Amino acid sequence: MRRSDLPAGFVLGTATAAYQIEGATQEDGRGASIWDAFARVPGAIADGTTGEPADDHYHRMPEDVALIADLGFDAYRFSIAWPRIQADGTGPANPAGIDFYRRLAESLLERGVTPWATLYHWDLPQALEERGGWLERDAASRFADYAAQVTDQLGDVITDWITLNEPWCSSFLGYASGVHAPGRNTGARSAQAAHHLLLGHGLGLEAIRATQPEARVGTTLNLYSVRPASDSEADRDAARRIDGLSNRFFLDPVLRGTYPEDVLDDLGQASWFAEHAPSDDLRRISAPIDFLGINYYSRHTVAAGAESDAVDGPPSAYPGSEDVRFVRTGAPVTEMGWEIHPDGMVDVLRQANELAPGLPLYITENGAAYADQVDAAGEIADPERTAYLQTHVEACRSAVDSGLPLAGYFIWSLMDNFEWAWGYSRRFGIVHVDYETQRRTVKHSGRWVTDLLRGEGAAEAAAQLREG
Ligand code: IFM
């Protein structure tokens, strides 16, 4: 696989998110987010850690930008921490918060790397959660106000904007299973949070178009390739439900301006949506976007029948569809237990393209967690991650060759970081972070990426340069 196998102009980038890397959670006027509060709840995070200091990126940003540029990436997708801009989710933008992201964007541009900014990667200001969070319609208006201020003040240095990252996680992991912040168990009401998030996308999009007409704006959904474990009617219905809640419940409103009725029925939410999600909301949610971002990691194989550990585990993230099992197929999995299935990436790209033919698509996240070991020489050999990335880049090529409008691919993640409910116990980076010293070391997968981006031997030459 060579870079020249992909079309000219195909964007190759890497991604992170604010809470996962920045640290400095109480500096320069940053307010508390739902993740600051949730991480302090005993038992919420597997290893008992928080996003402090994470990768200390807030203080090491210049070094990290140099790393991104040296690795050879075209683009860097980061997120803006809402509580750095508005400590309590309202009011004028905090100049120190704006200044940090301006310096980040300018440093990237100086090194020839295009900044891509996500406005909401899960860090809702805690003050807004205390007013009901995403279960309240007002959160959407607050988000639009925040988006308008950020794009107004940073629109001269950032052109590519993503409104939301993975609203499925924010709504169903945050408000149904509660394994993510804010850790609430509201059952099918979590679908109302999803509507308010999507409305936030629609209102935010309008606000960005008004402040920065030349911006390229999209949103990012986490999509799964879903298939039934057998051809039985019950298993096919299970697949319909999981495809419905994970994929169609977000794709349809954004790309077609409708909610899938079967999913509203599964959720028992048809009457709430009839009353509270008027056609005007859907008109805004489905306003034209410049691209769709897709985060793809894995395939789900599902069967009828409840999970055996459902009684002891957290409430389902699939309210109304609790009678569905996620089947282990025996195919290789990453340390997250996620099945590796590169062809599924082409499936989800095709699914999106069928709804909006020709709309540019970007894989805004793809990557793998493995239990990396640092050897005696300080090297991190991670052949499984390299194979994962290589097969998914090859899947990009297949997608392009089959005529799908895939325009770019971002690796999750630049460096090891705070993996939400898993804390620091899962490593996704192509750069290793020693959390004791904050030393960054490029893993073998990172060298493979540099060779892909710049040609064979580039990684070795760069390493020699670094060593002086
Ligand atoms: O770390 C997350 C990221 O924040 C959102 N997408 C999935 C990644 C891996 O779980």
Image (spheres, rainbow, N blue to C red):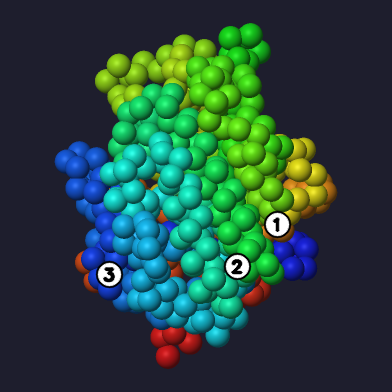
Q: Nearer the viewer, residue 380 or 426?
A: 426
Q: Where is the C terminus found, in terms of image quarters? A: bottom left
Q: Nearer the viewer, residue 358 or 157?
A: 157
Amino acid beneath label 2: Thr
Asked whether the viewer can see residue 140, the reply is yes
Residue found at x 29% / y 50%? 126
Distance Cα–Cα, label 1 vs label 3? 33 Å
Q: Which residue is mark 3?
A: 29
Q: Which mark is residue 290?
A: 1
Amino acid beneath label 1: Asp
Amino acid beneath label 3: Gly
Mark 1 or 3, nearer chain start: 3
Q: Which residue is mark 2?
A: 211
Q: Nearer the viewer, residue 48 or 429?
A: 48
Task: Single out the mark in the foreground, 1 or 3.
Answer: 3
Q: Residue furthest bottom?
A: 468
Distance Cα–Cα, label 2 vs label 3? 25 Å
Could you say whether the residue bearing mark 2 is in a helix, strand or loop? helix
Residue found at x 71% / y 37%? 256
Could you say whether the residue bearing mark 3 is in a helix, strand or loop? loop
Mark 2 or 3, nearer chain start: 3
